[in-house]
Each structure stands twice: as structure tokens, then as C-alpha cells.
Image: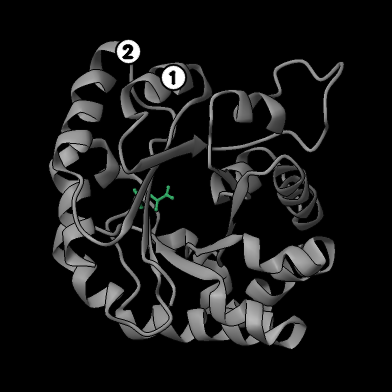
Amino acid sequence: MRRTLIAGNWKMNGSLAANAPLLDGLRAGAAGACELAVCVPAPYLAQVQASLSGSSIAWGAQDVSEHESGAFTGEVSAAMLKDFACRYVIVGHSERRSYHGESDELVARKAVRALDAGLVPVVCVGETLQEREAGSTDAVVIRQLAPVLSEVGARLRDIVIAYEPVWAIGTGKTATPAMAQQVHELIRATLAKTNADAANAVRVLYGGSMKPDNAKELLAMPDIDGGLIGGASLKAADFLAIAAAA
Ligand code: PEP
């Protein structure tokens, strides 16, 4: 009942010239039952919209302002993302939490702002290596989810969650399927305390060095409903191979 979602996070990579063959490759190779999306740097949204319109691939952004509009220099509003027909926006990526000091509460407000505009927020949660080694993975994930759950309320079923252990992002270290499944199960159980039906419907993606050679076993886990893919989303062949493994 949960359609697998394979979403790329290009991060701060790309150029008009480099994006063109990547987008052409994705468009030409997209096939199969799972949903594909790319979350790209904001300046390239027009290019991505032009390239992917009419295809089965969705697109989105990597962050959104908590504010509706106004004097917030450098920020991008949810309405602006809608202007470029975005479907998704990542909120609370660990790089935003750690390099830009984003709090759990701010992430929750961004998720609400995205929902208000008709976007699907991909809410990222996950523990650092230090937190895992201290045995606090579950507590961290529950703490990160708490304000999101209270802020989104009845719209819980309209969000996507990405579990991304920080120690696995861009490091080549992947959580084992069993480790990831354990946290995904915890996330779904936490959602179920608020709304059991929505908990069954919400897609929980895994992110952290997912590649063509480890995607199949991760995606086979019962509570892993897709992937948020960083490095491997920059090569069409790798991204499509991950989707083919779903
Ligand atoms: C990410 O940035 O969300 C991510 C999962 O990156 P990578 O796949 O490169 O670890």
C-alpha cells in the first residue's frame, strides 16, 4: 500500500551544463513501479521543471523558509517552490541541522509551511555517531519527531519521513538492513501513537550511502519504503539502478 519512493538529494552540486545530461538520462531510463524524485538546488528548479515536465519523475527542493514571505534575505518560500511545480521539499536534513543550527521545532514549522503550500515535506531525522554509541538513537529520533507530530496534526499522512543516520551520510558507511529496520519500526510505532492509520500510510525512507549494491537488501525491509539518495543521485545510471532494486 506504500508506493516506494526513491528521492535524490543533489545537495550543492550541479550546473546548467552538468544537469542536462543527468536529467536526460533520468527521463530516458525512468521505468518501473516506484516513484522517482529529485531534490535540486533552487536555482535549477526552472531547468528541472522544463526537463522533467510530462515525465513520471517528480522534483523538489532541499529546504524551505518557515516564513510565508517578506524581509528574509536569502530564503526561499514554499509558494516560490510551488511556482516551479515542486512536489517535495526536504526539511531538517542533518547538514541543515548541524551547519545551520536548525532545531527540531524549526524543522517542524518548515514542514507545516510546506504542507500549507501543498508541498510534501520529506522530514529527515537521525542520530550522530556519538549518539548511537551512547545508546540514545531511539531517544534522539523520538525527540526529533515530537514537534513534527504535534505541529502537523491530522496532516501526518501527507508527509514523508527519511531516517538518515548522520554517520552514514556521505561516508560510505551504511546502516545494516537490520539496524535501519529497527529504527524504521520505531518511527512507525511512534507515528502510530498519534494516528495508526496515518502511520501505516506514511513512507519512511532510508538515507545514508545507499548505492546500487546495497539498495536491494535495505529496500527489502518491511518498514523501509524507499531511499533518500545523496552521492548516487548524481549519476543517472546509479540512481536508476537503485530504483530498479526496489
Ligand atoms: C543525503 O544527503 O541525504 C544522503 C543520504 O547522502 P549519501 O547518499 O551521499 O550518503
Q: Residue 153: x and y, percent? A: 81, 67
The image quadrant where one finds the C terminus is bottom left
Question: What amino acid does circle 2 point to?
Answer: Leu
Q: Residue at x 35, y 46 (%)?
A: 230
Q: Which residue is mark 2?
A: 16
The reply to whether callout 1 and callout 2 are in contact (CB within 8 Å) is: yes
Please tell me whether residue 224 is drawn above or below residue 105 in the rendered image: below
Q: Is residue 147 visible?
A: no
User: Quadrant of residue 150 in the image?
Assistant: bottom right
Q: Which residue is mark 1?
A: 44
Spot the residue most to the right: 71
Q: Residue at x 71, y 23 (%)?
A: 75
The image quadrant where one finds the N terminus is bottom left
Q: Residue at x 33, y 15 (%)?
A: 15
Between 60 and 63, the residue placed more toward the observer is 60
Q: Residue 242: x and y, percent? A: 21, 57
Question: What amino acid does circle 1 point to?
Answer: Tyr
Q: Residue 29: x and y, percent? A: 14, 42
Specify few, some or many for label 1: CA neighbours under 10 Å numbering under 14, 14-19, or 20 or more.
some
Between 167 and 61, the residue placed more toward the observer is 61
Marks 1/2: CA–CA distance: 7 Å
Q: Is mark 2 within 8 Å of ligand 1?
A: no
Give SS at disc 2. Answer: helix
Sequence order check, earlier mark of 1 and 2: 2
Q: Residue 221: x and y, percent? A: 33, 82
| Colouring style | one colour
Please tell me whether residue 197 is drawn above or below residue 60 in the rendered image: below
Spot the residue most to the front: 54
